[in-house]
Image (tube, rainbow, N blue to C red):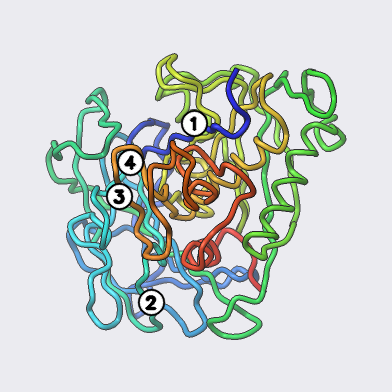
Amino acid sequence: MRSAVAILLACLATACVAAPYDLGAEGGPAQTKDGTDAEDDGGSQLTVDLGDVTPGAEVAFDVPNGALGFNVSVVGPGSSRVGIASLADPRGDLLVRDYRPSGAETDLALGSRGVSAISVPMNDAPISAGRWTLVAGGLDVPADAPVDKTGKAGRTGTPVTSPLRVTVRIQQARAKEGTFAGGTLDVHVYVPEGLRVHDPEPLHELRAGSLARDVSLGRRIDTFFTELERLFGIGRGRVSFHVIDGAFRSATTGDARAALVAQATAEDDQALHIVLTNEMSYGGGAPLLGYSVGMPGTANLPGTVRSGVAVALYPDGNATNDATTILHELGHFVGLLHTQDDDGTLDLLSDTETCDTRAKACAAADNLMAPDGPLRTAVVTKAQLRVVRGSPIYRAL
């Protein structure tokens, strides 16, 4: 029997495959004189569609005053490793160099299976208004090439030559420029037909038409939103339910986990997508409670392997633990790393405490992003607040 707080949370950026995202019409959108197509969707997100970008070519986009942060997504051929080779702020300082964010020990900006993303803020660097520049690129690799789960293996393949679709989504503070003043998060919940759940009700199966009324499912969602507001000051928005095929009640291979997350297909300008299952693991190994392929994911871009988070509901779990798992995976989705992994890898933030969190003997053990989840009531740091609040997935005030 696993402890309710011993959460095995896996979030490896190269562990899944999925059907390639539709790149859209050849040639991309109409371009403005600066090479970008900016669109305000009516929420707090400003979308800058850079269109089909030539790998290795520098492109620019403008970040306005009042921005809390932004997310860049890169989509290419389905089996390729694509990403952001470099990202420079208006002063010319590189936040990403050779696919590696400043302070990172791995190529976090180089994804797999044809999709990648990067978010700002992701470390202690400031958000600067003005013209940013980036270079997208990647490697073409065979579809059956082995996947490196550590993210530390050498790069193999030939340079990508196909155009890459690059989009920037900027979070804007509307109440006061550059200052977080609250907001709300919409959520899409994807439920396989016949998913089993309990607490506070006995173990039972979920069916279409009863999802919004189910007490056990509602307990998890309610607890998640309560903790989201307590920790980050982001309130509850709309909750939408989607029934998916019952085959997704189990996801124990890379392909299955990828297909599970890719069920996050609902079109929504700003939202978090949560895909539920009853069984999840790496090849039948230790059970996974939560799974987020991207650190970060592709914010507000549906239908990719990085479009949402997956959470497994087990008979020996409970609603509070499952809600904490969702919140932890949200942290990864917007760009937070574990405070310190078992191999000693640290996050990119200066104010998170580190120690051997398995010993549960330091303040880091209570951090939301501790590798096994928080031991007691979850806490976050000021830098972690800044990363979460900079993501465009919620509607800022």
* Residue for point 22% across, 79% down: 92
User: Mark 4 is on which residue type?
Assistant: Gly
SS at badge 4: loop
* Residue for point 47% across, 70% down: 69
Labels 2 and 1: the sequence-earlier one: 1
Above or below residue 302? Residue 132 is below
Above or below residue 117? Residue 319 is above
Which numbered mark, 2 or 1, is in the foreground of this view? Answer: 1
Labels 4 and 3: the sequence-earlier one: 3
Residue linked to disc 3: 108
Residue 114, horizontal then vertical, whole percent: 33, 41
Residue 256, horizontal then vertical, whole percent: 47, 22
Q: How far, Cα to Cα, is label 1 from label 3?
A: 21 Å
Residue 67, horizontal then vertical, whole percent: 50, 77
Residue 99 location, quadrant = bottom left
* Residue for point 60% across, 76% down: 180
Say the numbered circle drawn on residue 8.
1
Q: How far, Cα to Cα, is label 3 from label 2?
A: 19 Å
Residue linked to disc 2: 126
Query: Can you name the residue that lies furthest to the top here?
Result: 284
Q: How far, Cα to Cα, is label 2 from label 1?
A: 32 Å
Residue linked to disc 4: 114
SS at badge 3: loop
The residue carrying pointer 3 sits among few (fewer than 14), some (14 to 19) or many (20 or more) residues within 10 Å by Cα, namely: many
* Residue for point 47% across, 73% down: 38
